[in-house]
Image (spheres, rainbow, N blue to C red):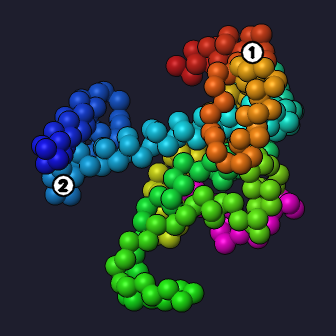
């Protein structure tokens, strides 16, 4: 049954790629099909590349955005500070663009803290293996042993992240960062040569989603105050990631009209 499922899956994703390649506009599927003969790729190779793009990028990105919304509901003071930054830089006459990102350090810090606070791949993403026998703190690790990092524990070590269950974007602001092995300040995308190859795409899409969401809406929990207090207590213990219903209140009366006007101008 597993072999049948794998065969069907490969055929499905190859057919999906071929369908996407038929579109007029340039896209990833079109590039794969055109490059298939040049690089000697099989249909299974094409199916695998497409499946990885969808499987590795859709659920992980949406889960990160849900965690960000959760943080805004439970730690509303961070949302207010980010919105003040956006209002100062962007103003009210237009919506944010990628050109605004360098001037919005607190928003960038909120996304980084989301990666750390509720990492999607809590067990380190891609596994690694030593190429030869190794020993670490008295543990013998034979060559080719599958090693998966405990990212949940790494991102909650009080040495690098005091009060780890508190959502604190300030951790990533200049002058307030504690030493960490890499410049990014977290390992949400793994580490080494086998870290997630989709990191730039995920970060680019998420940062603009975060900024535009905060520009247009106030994000509030759809719960009464007593339930929210109980939920925050659970989050502080790391035993929940759900907030239930949420409420989105428009911050700008003409936000939708502004976005529609910009889309029309771009076309």
Q: Is any atom of residue 121 visible in this view?
A: yes
Secondary structure of the magenta portion, mostly? loop
User: Could you tell me which secondary element the residue under label 2 belongs to?
Assistant: loop
Q: Which of 15 and 65 is in front in this view?
A: 65
Q: Is any atom of residue 265 visible in this view?
A: no
Mark 1 and mark 2: Cα distance apart in space: 49 Å
* Circle 2 residues within 10 Å: few <14, some 14–19, many ≥20: few
Which residues lie in the magenta part?
174-189
162, above or below 243, in the image = below
17, above or below 93, in the image = below
Q: Look at mark 1 in the image and give the residue it sits on.
A: 250
Q: Horizontal and vertical percent for residue 62? A: 53, 36
Q: Horizontal and vertical percent for residue 197? A: 45, 56
Q: In the rendered structure, which disc, 1 or 2, sits on the residue that comes first in sequence?
A: 2
User: Which residue: 71% across, 42% down?
Assistant: 235
Q: Look at mark 2 in the image and give the residue it sits on.
A: 41
195 vs 85, left or right, is: left
Q: Nearer the viewer, residue 205 or 89?
A: 205
Task: State which quadrant residue 186 falls in.
Answer: bottom right
User: Could you tell me which secondary element the residue under label 1 belongs to?
Assistant: strand
Q: Indicate yes or no whether the magenta region holds residue 143.
A: no
144 vs 198, left or right, is: left
User: Which residue: 47% across, 51% down?
Assistant: 198
Q: Horizontal and vertical percent for residue 19? A: 23, 30
* Circle 1 residues within 10 Å: few <14, some 14–19, many ≥20: some
């Amino acid at each position: 049954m597993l072999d049948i499922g794998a065969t069907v899956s490969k055929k499905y994703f190859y057919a999906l790629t071929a369908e996407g390649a038929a579109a007029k506009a340039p896209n990833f599927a079109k590039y794969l099909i055109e490059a298939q003969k040049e690089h000697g790729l099989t249909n299974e190779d094409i199916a695998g590349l497409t499946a990885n793009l969808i499987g590795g990028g859709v659920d992980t990105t949406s889960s990160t955005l849900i965690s960000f919304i959760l943080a805004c509901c439970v730690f509303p003071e961070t949302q207010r500070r980010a919105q003040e930054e956006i209002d100062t830089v962007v103003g009210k006459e237009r919506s944010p663009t990628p050109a605004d990102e360098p001037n919005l350090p607190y928003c960038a810090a909120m996304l980084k803290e989301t990666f750390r606070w509720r990492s999607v791949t809590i067990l380190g993403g891609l596994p690694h293996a030593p190429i030869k026998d190794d020993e670490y703190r008295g543990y013998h690790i034979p060559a080719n042993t599958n090693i998966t990092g405990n990212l949940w524990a790494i991102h909650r070590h009080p040495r690098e992240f005091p009060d780890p269950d508190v959502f604190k974007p300030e951790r990533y602001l200049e002058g307030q960062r504690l030493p960490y092995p890499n410049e990014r300040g977290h390992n949400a995308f793994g580490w080494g040569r086998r870290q997630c190859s989709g990191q730039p795409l995920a970060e680019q899409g998420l940062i603009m989603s975060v900024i535009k969401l905060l520009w247009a809406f106030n994000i509030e929990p759809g719960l009464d105050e007593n339930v929210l207090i109980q939920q925050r207590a659970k989050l502080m213990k790391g035993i929940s990631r759900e907030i239930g219903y949420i409420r989105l209140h428009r911050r700008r009366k003409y936000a939708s009209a502004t976005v529609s006007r910009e889309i029309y101008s771009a076309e």
